[in-house]
Amino acid sequence: MTIFILAFIIMVLIVAGMALGAIVQNKPLKGSCGGLNKIGMKKDCDICGGDDDECEKEQERQRQAALANTAAQSDLAYDATSKQNKQS
C-alpha cells in the first residue's frame, strides 16, 4: 500500500509540474504532429476551416481586442498630477 501511495504522490507532482509549466509559459497549447490533417479532416476544423493562417489571424485579432480593452480601461482614470490637466 505504501508503494501505491508513493507512486500516486509522484504522479500528482508530475502532473502539477506540467500544469505549472504550461501556465508559466503562457503559450497556447498545440496539437500533436498531424491531428485532423493526418486523417483527412482538416477542412472540418471549426476554427480555421482548413486555412493554416486563420488561427494566427484569430490570435492577432484577440491580441488587438485585449489591447483595445486595456486602453479603454486606462481612459477611465484621471491623472490630476499631470501638468497638461492643470489650468492656470
Image (cartoon, helix red, strand yellow):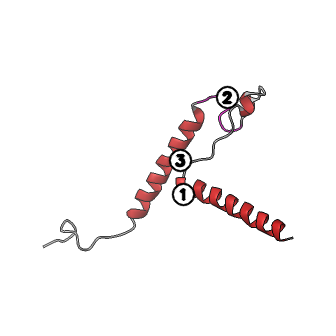
Q: Residue at x 69, y 58 (%)?
A: 15
Tell me, yes or no, whether the two marked residues, 2 and 1, touch with CB atoms within 8 Å.
Answer: no
Q: Tags 1 and 3 in contact by the CB under 8 Å rule?
A: no
Q: Nearer the viewer, mark 1 or mark 3?
A: 1
Query: Where residue 76 appears, x then y in whole percent?
Result: 40, 67
For mark 1, does the 10 Å Cα neighbourhood hold few (<14), some (14 to 19), or many (20 or more) residues? few
Amino acid type, mark 2: Gly
Marks 1/3: CA distance?
A: 20 Å
**N-terminal of the two: label 1 or label 3?**
1
What SS does tag 1 mark? helix
Determine which residue is flagged by label 3. Answer: 62
Mark 3 element type: helix
- The residue shown at (63%, 42%) is 30
Q: For mark 2, what is the residue? A: 50
For disc 3, the neighbor class at 10 Å (few under 14, some 14 to 19, many from 20) is: few
Query: Please, which residue is most extreme toward the top here?
Result: 40
Range of residues picked out in magenta: 46-52
Is residue 61 one of those drawn in magenta?
no
* Direction from residue 42 to residue 82 in the image, left or right: left
Question: What element does badge 2 sit on?
Answer: loop
> Which of pointers 2 and 1 indicates the residue nearer the eye?
1
Under mark 1, the amino acid is Val
Q: Quadrant of residue 31?
A: top right
In the rendered image, the quadrant that contains the C terminus is bottom left
| Amino acid at circle 3 | Gln
Quadrant holding the N terminus: bottom right
User: In the image, which disc is placed on residue 24?
Assistant: 1
